[in-house]
Each structure stands twice: as structure tokens, then as C-alpha cells.
Amino acid sequence: MASKLLSMRRLSRIVKSRCPSLPYPSSSVQRSRALRPEASVSLLVISNTDVFPSSSSSRNFCSRPFNLDDAEGPATIDYRSLLQEEDFQRLADLTIHDLQEKLEEYGDDVQIDGFDVDYGSDVLTVKLGALGTYVLNKQTPNRQIWLSSPVSGPSRFDWDKDVQTWVYRRTGAKLYEVLESELKQLCDEPISLSFS
């Protein structure tokens, strides 16, 4: 994912440097909607001749045809079920403050040099010294809680109304269970984070 983003940034720089007078949007830049009605993703389509005007070839940037039906990735989000912003803020704040309290208590029980829990600007940071750092923060526009983990990397958790917890749609993992498992693995001390 990061390499795709980097490629898109490079492509954007090339377009800007080779075609500085190109207005946005122009006739050569078209907006197309994804084929699924529940998706509201916009894609930019730029032809090779717009980026490389002297090029006579018409090669594609993608090595395989793009087919939305075959695309792998996270489960489709039903946008009608997204939380209202005030509900999201309440649930996310409650979750992060609950985690902060329990992690501070956990820090008193484990003997790890550099263990520290800090909360500021809607970001919860848990430092485990040489073992790594966890970062949890709210992403209000997406109605998600993002977790950066030294064990599993980045994850984006959505509120699941059916099970009443934060769930990573790609794997089905629950936020509290991920943290409990990983902290036990790293610190050799079990922790119970079940929502109270």
C-alpha cells in the first residue's frame, strides 16, 4: 500500500513538472465513479500522452487489468451503518480513556524499563521501552480508531454494532483482544482489557 502511494506521489510530481499549465480538472483528466453504487470512490484517469507528450507508445501503468470484482482487500463498508459523529466521539473517547486507565494499572504490575502511558491531543501512546511503542488515535472522518503496533503494524478498527466492539474488518480481529494478546506476548504478563 505504501509503495502504491509513493508511486502515485511520483506520478503527480511528474505530471506537475511536465504539464504545469494543465488546469485541474481538464479534458485529459477524467473523474470516474466506481461501479458499485455503495462506493463513493473517485479515480483519476490520466493517459500516457498527457504525462509524456512526446511519447508515441500507449502503455498502461498497471501490469494487469483492473477488475473491481477480483480486487482483494478489506470487506465492503455499508456506509449507511456508519456512526454519527457524536456517537463515534463518545465511543472512541470512552474506549481510549478506558484503555489508558487499564494500561496505567498494567504498567504498575510489569517490570519493564521505559514503560510509559501518555494521552494528549486525542492520541494514546504506550511506550514499552526497548520492546516498542503502541499508538492509538481517533480518525473521525473515517469513524475509526487507528492502532500502530510494534508487533502487528498498523490496523484500522471500526465500531461493530452487532458485537459492540471495535473490529479490524480485514481480519475480524477485535481491538481489545489484539492488545491483550500482544502485550502478553511482549511483556510476559497477562492483561484483561475487556470493556467495562
Image (spheres, rainbow, N blue to C red):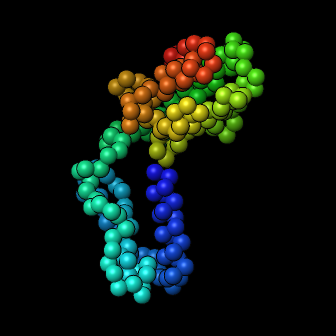
Q: Mark yes or no: residue 90 visible.
A: no
Q: Nearer the viewer, residue 189 or 103?
A: 189
Q: Is residue 67 left or right of residue 113?
A: left
70, above or below 189, in the image = below
Query: Based on the displayed image, in which of its 4 quarters is residue 44 positioned?
Result: bottom left
151 relative to 36 in the view: left or right: right
42 sits left or right of 35 in the view:
right
Residue visible at 44% across and 39% down in the picture: 84
Q: Residue at (51%, 30%) from the top-left corner?
A: 91
Dividing the picture into quarters, in which one does residue 105 lie? Answer: top right
Residue 37: give x, y in percent of width and height: 25, 53
Q: Using the image, determine if residue 90 lies above or below residue 195.
A: below
Considering every residue shown, the one lying at the far right of the view is: 113
Vertical relation: 166 (above or below) 143? above
Image position of 81 with respect to 58: above or below: above
Residue at 29 percent of width and 50 percent of height: 71
Give the image location of residue 36, x and y in percent: 25, 53
Q: Residue at x 33, y 70 (%)?
A: 60
Residue 69 visible somewhere in the drawing: yes
Q: Number of numbered discs present?
A: 0
The picture places residue 143, in percent across and down from the top left corner, at 47, 40
Tell me residue 150's x, y (percent).
59, 33
